[in-house]
Image (tube, grey):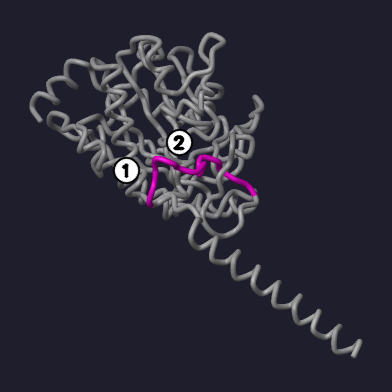
Amino acid sequence: MRYRRRRFRYRGLVCLLVLLALVTTVAYVVFRPDPGDNTDNAQDAGAIGKGEGPGAPQEAEDSSGDVRMPEIGPDDDGTQTGATDPNTSSDGEEADGPYTLGTALSEGEAVDDSWFEDAVFLGDSRTEGLQLYSGITTGTFFWEWGMSVFKVDDTGHRKVAVNGENMTLMEALSTGTWNKVYIMLGINDLGYPAQSYQKALAEVVDQVREIQSDAVIYLQTMPPVNESMAQANGIAYYINNENVKAFNEAITQVAQEKQVVLLDTASCLTDSQGQLPADMSSDGVHFKKAGYQTWLEYLKCHTISQEDYQAAREAA
């Protein structure tokens, strides 16, 4: 009799555990978030995460899980390997004719740092690296680790420091007037569908144009990652060149749709295998000093005057 009661207790416990497992499974299926369906409540794919498991990027309350800009010493160097520039013809000559907005801007005569005195750069930790290690001596930089196109005006993400005050990226952009706005955003959004990113990026351009109505807007394509290095450094699985390529196509479409300048920045930091050259990268995502210098030299050789920009907009 005692054995029979004990057996009934075990059966009851097993049934209870099975019931709890079923309830948990149903709750997960019903309530799990889908970043592709609701970008207004976007998760922090902005983290260039380490140690992420398979599946969708996990939500983070802040950027503490981001891969931060590695410190680069004065002797850190690298040599550009196999990078090409599609803005020139096969014989190295510049493309002829007036500029068409939304197409990759052709190479021109290099400017000096004074060109950037009235320029502002919007971005993430890669833009931080451009400010710190390229050697640029002018320009205003608004960046934040893990910055995302979904966070540029998020009042819950006031992390851009301006004169001792924390602001959103768009609030920071409203603190002054600039004639040139350089935008590179997207590496932290690679966990989202390209369509969601494209829609959000288009909204970013609209906001920039509203705040800085007279400025020349430069949209930059994203340089690739070095996938083997990124994997070795524990970078999240969705930070890969297949996604970078899809996002760069989205950037091109936004540049065409919004009639702004397209800079194919990716071309100067891509090797013959379509990778970020290993000798120009610190972790597979960020660049070494020589990489940031190469980026700056590209920007100096790809410029357009405000007059030509306005003329191109009127002709569009």
Give the structural element (helix, strand or loop) at label 2. loop
Report which residue position mark 2 lands on.
Answer: 148
Mark 2 residue crowding within 10 angstroms, few (<14) / some (14–19) / many (20+) = many
Q: Position of residue 270 (x, y in %)?
A: 43, 45
**Separation (CA) of disc 1 from disc 2:** 12 Å
Single out the residue that lies furthest toward the left.
315
Q: Nearer the viewer, residue 43 or 280?
A: 43
Q: Position of residue 125 (x, y in %)?
A: 53, 31
Q: Nearer the viewer, residue 138 or 93?
A: 138
Q: Position of residue 25 (x, y in %)?
A: 57, 66
Number of numbered labels in the structure image: 2
Q: Nearer the viewer, residue 53 or 32?
A: 32
Name the chief secondary structure element in magenta: loop
Q: Is residue 43 magenta?
A: yes
Residue type beneath disc 1: Gln
For the magenta stretch, what is the residue range?
Answer: 37-50
Residue shown at the point (61%, 52%) measured from the top left: 52
Q: Position of residue 76 (x, y in %)?
A: 63, 31
Res. 267 image quadrant: top left
Question: Which of the two labelled residues, at mark 1 and mark 2, occupies the earlier sequence position?
Answer: 2
Q: Is residue 269 above or below residue 217?
A: below
Q: Is residue 85 above or below residue 194?
A: above
Q: Nearer the viewer, residue 185 or 210?
A: 210
Please say if the residues under marks 1 and 2 sit with CB atoms less than 8 Å apart: no
Residue shown at the point (64%, 72%) measured from the top left: 19
Report which residue position mark 1 lands on.
Answer: 198
Res. 255 image quadrant: top left
Quadrant the N terminus occupies: bottom right
